[in-house]
Amino acid sequence: MLGFTWTATIWGLALFALRRVPWLHIKLDREHFAIILLLLSTHSLSRTSAEEILSDPVTFERALRGVLVAIALLIVVPVILKRLRGGAQPGGKAIVALMIYVAVAAASFFYSAAPIVSLAKTFELAVVLAVAIAFTMRGDAKDALRSALQLVVVLEGALIAVAVLGYFTMPSAFHLVGGRPGFLAGPTLKSPYAHFNHLSASSGMLFAYALSSVLSVRIRSARVGWISVSVVATAGMLLSAGRQGLVIFLASAAVVLFFQRRRLFLIGIVPLSALVVVANWDLLFGLAQRGQSASNFSSLSGRLEWWSVAADVWRVHPWTGYGFGTGGRFVALREVGSNASSLHNGYIEALTGVGIIGFLPLLYAIVRATSWSLTSLRRGVMSSEAILIVPLLLHTAVSLGFGAWMVADVLLFMFLAALSDVDSRRTLMPTAPLLTAGVVENGS
């Protein structure tokens, strides 16, 4: 409950303050309130082992999470029904693929290794999809989805900002002493409401969005604001000392600069970066290794072993898997005696959970969202939203990401997929309007 209390307080204060920031485009319509409830529910559960969940699957905190998700559903269902009666069309090809994915996840209840877990996690996933569908049925669907993406990014950013502030003002709550060497001198950043790896990856994602916004906006106050956000994101990534956050940070920055400042990237940044890496290789490699043994570092902190075991158990039931959200934690990881919460690879998690039958529609939605994002980056339209696909794809490769049950990445991915559907509906125009995170033009 401590994480839930911290998160609710931080987000309440942030929403009160940030609604008055002119360079943010945050709405608080009914669908957006549903998003807040869904995100809040992900912070309402304490860490437990697979055995504890199987022996006692229904607890107060899990019930609280279910209540928050149910309220979000009650908010969005009347909206969908009203728009259906008004003749609105929901989604497109990516949304249909995600509907098939959720349907397969729901069917996996009947053969799941932990049926109650699969049922609960599928319910959460279905509610996120319902919110995305509701957005696609709006008259201002594109703007509303962009606002939804920004809302998720900003809420994650608020948690990072408080963590960075707490690192310097509340060391007892935000310092991790021992056990994890940092990139910088001193303790590593932790928080009462989010794992340090989550803070690291979220910081990389926040930086990607902020950097693209800095290079897109034309309003001075917006540019200054996003520069400030990028500084906070950089501090969060460095202090939390997560390698996944570092990779997301560097890769996202490279993609942003390649598409939005290509000449500077190719002529200045690439040669300079190569020179710095070559001249300081031993130092940089030592920082990345973070004091780990060579074997632990080369195995990606045990991930390669988990993935190997997951591949073995997946081959037994390749088409259907072992039940949504259960193939990794309740089957593969139990074989090696690990208490990890997931396989730390969302793609493998999906394969072991819903098998090939469920993974193929998810893969189609991934391809649709990625194709739209690359096209948008190339055209310089909605770049701040499009760049999110880079941290999402990378995070899913080394953590859960959007590959299974509900976390912030799932909302971002489904909203990107929905945005790709909505944007494909547009009529041909002589010149596409340039939309940025700091300003939304009329008629967008």
Image (spheres, helix red, strand yellow):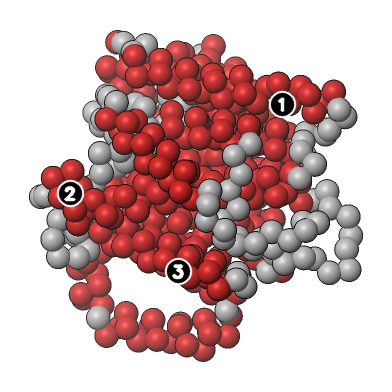
Task: Decide which of 439, 415 is in the foreground and name it.
Answer: 439
Q: Nearer the viewer, residue 338 or 419?
A: 419
Tell me if 49 is positioned left or right of 375 in this view.
Answer: left
On residue 79, which mark appears?
A: 1
User: Label 3 sits on what residue type?
Assistant: Ile
Residue 320 appears anywhere in the view: no
Locate the C terminus by quadrant. Answer: bottom right
Viewer-proximal residue among 195 and 150 = 150
Earlier residue among tags 3 and 2: 2
Q: Earlier in the sequence, mark 2 or mark 1?
A: 1
In what element is the residue under mark 1?
helix
Residue 338 location in percent, x, y? 25, 31
Determine whether 170 is above or below 435 in the image.
Answer: above
Q: Nearer the viewer, residue 345 or 122?
A: 122
Left or right: 245 as drawn, with respect to 147: left
**Is residue 357 shown above or below 368?**
above
Instruction: Determine which residue is flagged by label 3.
Output: 227
Q: Callout 1 environment at 10 Å: few (<14), some (14 to 19), or many (20+)?
A: some
For residue 170, the mark is 2
Residue at (34, 14) in percent of width and height: 60
- Label 3 neighbourhood size at 10 Å, few (<14), some (14-19), many (20+)? some
Q: At which x and y percent is residue 222?
A: 54, 66
